[in-house]
Image: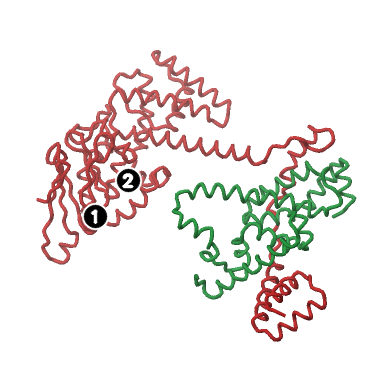
C-alpha cells in the first residue's frame, strides 16, 4: 500500500469513515512506516483539538432581540409568517449612534472654534460675528436640551431678552437663558456700544470668560481632549522633554501676546499691534495648523513657538529641528535646514522680511567646551537662508 | 430536532416557531462565530439567519434534515458576509503594491502562524473553514456537509482533508518556532 493511499485512509479514519478492513490495512501500514505513523499521530491530535473546541454561546438571546420585530411582522401578515422584514435590526440603532456621535462632534467643534475666537484678539466686526454665533449657539442649546419644556421656556426667555433689551428689564429667566447659552459657549468680548442689559449679561459672560481663560494645563487638557488634533499631544510630550526650563522661559518671554491674553482689560482691546499679529494673520495660522493664539500658547508650551513677523505678513514656527515660514494663507513658503537634535534655538525677526535664528548647543555649558553658536538668517524675499 | 415542533411551526403555530428558533439559536450562532471570527459579526449573521428561517419556514421540506437546512442558511449568510468584507478590504488595500498584495493572498499562513487551533482555523480560506466548522462544531457527516453546502461528497472530503493538512502545517510551523519558509 502506497503512502498516498494511506494518507486518505488516515483522514477518513478521523471521520469514522473506514470499514474494518480499511482500518486494518491502514494500521498495518503505519506499523511499518514511521513517516505515516507520525502523520497519523499529528492529524489525530489536531482532530482531537478540533473536537474539543469550546461551545461558544451568544452573549445575549438573539431570539429575544428579534422578537419585537417578529411580533410586528406577524401582525402584518395573516398567515403568521412575516412578509416584509427590514434587512437588519441593527440599522436604526446604528443610525442613532452615528447621529449622536456626529452631534457631539459638531458640538465639540463649535465650542472649539468659538474658544479660539475668544482667545483671538477681536475687532469690533468679529465681535458682531461672535454675537450672532452666540445667538445660534443658544438656539442650538435649546434644541438639544433633553427636557423639551425647559428648552421651550429658555428659548422663549431668549426671545424676550432680545425684545426687552432697550428697556432694561433683566429677568431671572432671561439671565438663566443667557447663562445657559454662555455655559455652552465661551462668551464674546465686550462691545463698547452695548446696552445696559447687554452689559449686565456680558458681565456674567465676562465671569465665564475669566473662568475660560485657559491655563497652560487647561490648554494641554483641551489638546488631549480634542481628537481633531491627534498629533499635538505626542509632539507636545516629546518636545517638552527636549526643552530646558530656561528655553521655555525664553519662549514665553517672546510671546507677549500670551501675557496680554491672560490679562484682558475691560474694553477687550488687549493687544498692542506690534506684539500681536493682526486678526488676519492669526486666522491664517488657524488654517495652517489648528487655532490661532491658543495654539500659539500650546505651541510655546511644547517648544513649537510661533513668531509673527513685525507687520504680521509672515509667521515663523519652530517645528522640531527646523523653522518653517508661512504666509497669510497658512501656506508654508520656506523651511530651514534641519539642525541637530540637541540644539537650542532662538528666533527673532530683524525686519519684515528677515528672520534670524540662533542655534546653540544645549550641552555647551555643562562640558565647558566653547562650541560657537550658529546664526542663520532667512531672507523671505529670496526664499533663502544663509549662515552668518 | 422535534419533527412535530417543525410541523407545527410550518402550520403557522407561532409559539412553536419561536420555540424552534430558540432551539437552533446556539448552533446558528456557533457556526457564525467560527466562520466570521468575531462576536459582533456572528450576532448580525445569526440574527439575519433566524429571521430568514422565520420567514422561510414554510419552504423547508422534510426530505432534507432540518439541521442541514438551517446550517445551509447560516453558512450562506456567513459566506456572503465574508465576501462583502473582502470586497471592502480590497478597496481599502487598493494602494498596496502588487507584490505585497500577492503576499497577502498567497502566503498569509506563512506571515501569521497560528499559536493554537482556533487561530489556525481563522487563517483558513473561507470554504475550508466552513467545512471544518460543519464537521467539528456541528458534528456533521460528509453527507450532511454535502447537503448543507450543496457540494458533491468528494468535494467535501477534498476540502476537509486539505483543510486539516493546512491546519496541521500552520500549527507545526508555529511549534517549530515560527520560522518562515
Residue A216 is labelled as 2
Q: Nearer the viewer, residue B101 or B71?
A: B101
Question: Chain A colour?
Answer: red
Mark 1 Cα-neighbour bin, 10 Å: few <14, some 14–19, many ≥20: few
The picture places residue B41, in percent across and down from the top left corner, at 63, 50
Task: Return the residue found at the far bottom.
Answer: A32
Numbered disc 1: what chain? A
Q: Is residue A237 something that shows in the picture?
A: yes
Q: Residue A164: which quarter of the image?
A: top left
User: What residue is shown at x 78% (from left), y 50% (from top)?
Assistant: B22
User: What residue is shown at x 69% (from left), y 37% (from top)?
Assistant: A86
- First of labels 1, 2 by sequence position: 2
> How many discs appear?
2
Q: Is residue B26 something that shows in the picture?
A: no
Considering the numbered disc 1 on the image, is that residue within a helix, a strand or a loop? Answer: helix
- Disc 1 to disc 2, how far (Cα)? 15 Å
Considering the numbered disc 2 on the image, is that residue within a helix, a strand or a loop? Answer: helix
Q: Which residue is mark 1?
A: A245
Question: Chain B colour?
Answer: green
**Answer yes or no: do the residues labelled 1 and 2 have beta carbons within 8 Å?**
no
Q: Is residue A63 left or right of residue A226?
A: right
Amino acid at each position: 500500500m502506497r503512502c498516498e493511499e494511506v494518507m486518505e485512509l488516515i483522514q477518513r479514519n478521523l471521520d469514522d469513515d473506514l470499514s474494518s478492513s480499511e482500518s486494518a490495512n491502514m494500521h498495518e501500514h503505519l506499523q511499518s512506516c514511521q513517516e505515516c505513523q507520525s502523520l497519523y499521530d499529528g492529524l489525530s491530535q489536531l482532530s482531537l483539538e478540533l473536537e474539543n473546541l469550546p461551545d461558544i454561546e451568544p452573549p445575549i438571546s438573539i431570539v429575544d432581540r428579534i422578537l419585537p420585530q417578529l411580533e410586528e411582522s406577524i401582525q402584518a401578515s395573516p398567515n403568521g409568517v412575516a412578509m416584509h422584514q427590514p434587512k437588519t435590526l441593527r440599522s436604526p440603532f446604528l443610525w442613532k449612534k452615528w447621529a449622536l456621535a456626529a452631534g457631539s462632534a459638531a458640538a465639540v467643534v463649535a465650542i472649539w472654534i468659538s474658544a479660539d475666537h475668544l482667545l483671538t484678539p477681536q475687532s469690533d466686526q468679529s465681535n458682531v460675528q461672535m454675537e450672532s454665533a452666540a445667538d445660534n449657539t443658544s438656539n442650538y442649546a435649546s434644541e438639544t436640551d433633553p427636557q423639551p419644556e425647559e428648552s421651550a421656556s429658555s428659548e422663549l426667555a431668549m426671545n424676550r431678552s432680545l425684545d426687552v433689551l432697550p428697556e432694561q428689564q433683566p429677568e431671572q429667566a432671561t439671565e438663566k437663558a443667557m447663562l445657559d447659552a454662555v455655559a455652552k459657549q465661551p462668551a464674546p468680548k465686550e462691545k463698547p456700544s452695548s446696552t445696559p442689559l447687554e452689559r449686565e449679561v456680558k458681565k456674567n459672560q465676562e465671569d465665564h470668560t475669566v473662568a475660560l481663560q485657559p491655563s497652560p494645563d487647561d490648554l494641554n487638557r483641551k489638546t488631549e481632549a480634542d481628537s481633531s488634533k491627534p498629533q499635538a499631544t505626542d509632539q507636545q510630550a516629546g518636545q517638552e522633554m527636549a526643552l530646558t526650563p530656561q528655553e521655555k522661559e525664553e519662549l514665553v518671554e517672546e510671546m507677549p501676546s500670551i501675557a496680554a491674553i491672560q490679562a484682558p482689560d475691560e474694553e477687550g482691546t488687549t493687544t498692542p499691534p506690534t506684539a500681536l499679529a493682526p486678526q488676519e494673520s492669526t486666522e491664517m495660522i488657524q488654517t495652517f495648523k489648528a487655532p490661532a493664539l491658543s495654539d500659539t500658547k500650546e505651541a510655546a508650551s511644547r517648544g513649537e513657538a510661533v513668531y509673527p513677523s513685525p507687520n504680521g505678513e509672515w509667521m515663523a514656527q519652530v517645528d522640531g529641528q527646523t523653522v518653517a515660514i508661512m504666509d497669510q494663507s497658512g501656506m508654508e513658503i520656506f523651511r530651514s535646514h534641519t539642525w541637530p537634535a540637541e540644539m537650542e534655538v532662538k528666533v527673532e525677526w530683524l525686519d519684515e522680511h528677515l528672520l534670524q535664528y540662533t542655534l546653540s548647543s544645549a550641552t555647551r555649558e555643562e562640558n565647558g567646551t566653547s562650541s560657537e553658536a550658529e546664526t542663520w538668517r532667512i531672507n523671505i524675499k529670496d526664499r533663502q537662508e544663509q549662515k552668518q | 430536532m422535534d419533527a412535530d415542533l417543525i410541523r407545527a411551526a410550518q402550520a403557522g403555530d407561532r409559539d412553536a416557531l419561536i420555540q424552534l428558533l430558540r432551539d437552533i439559536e446556539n448552533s446558528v450562532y456557533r457556526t457564525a462565530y467560527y466562520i466570521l471570527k468575531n462576536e459582533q459579526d456572528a450576532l448580525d449573521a445569526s440574527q439575519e439567519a433566524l429571521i430568514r428561517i422565520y420567514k422561510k419556514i414554510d419552504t423547508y421540506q422534510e426530505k432534507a434534515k432540518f439541521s442541514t437546512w438551517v446550517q445551509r442558511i447560516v453558512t450562506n449568510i456567513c459566506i456572503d458576509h465574508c465576501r462583502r468584507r473582502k470586497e471592502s478590504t480590497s478597496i481599502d488595500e487598493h494602494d498596496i503594491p502588487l507584490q505585497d498584495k500577492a503576499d497577502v493572498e498567497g502566503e498569509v499562513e506563512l506571515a501569521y502562524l497560528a499559536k493554537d487551533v482556533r487561530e489556525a482555523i481563522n487563517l483558513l480560506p473561507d470554504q475550508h473553514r466552513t467545512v471544518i466548522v460543519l464537521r467539528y462544531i456541528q458534528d456533521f457527516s460528509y453527507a450532511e456537509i454535502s447537503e448543507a453546502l450543496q457540494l458533491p461528497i468528494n468535494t467535501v472530503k477534498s476540502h476537509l482533508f486539505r483543510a486539516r493538512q493546512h491546519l496541521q502545517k500552520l500549527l507545526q510551523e508555529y511549534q517549530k518556532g515560527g520560522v518562515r519558509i
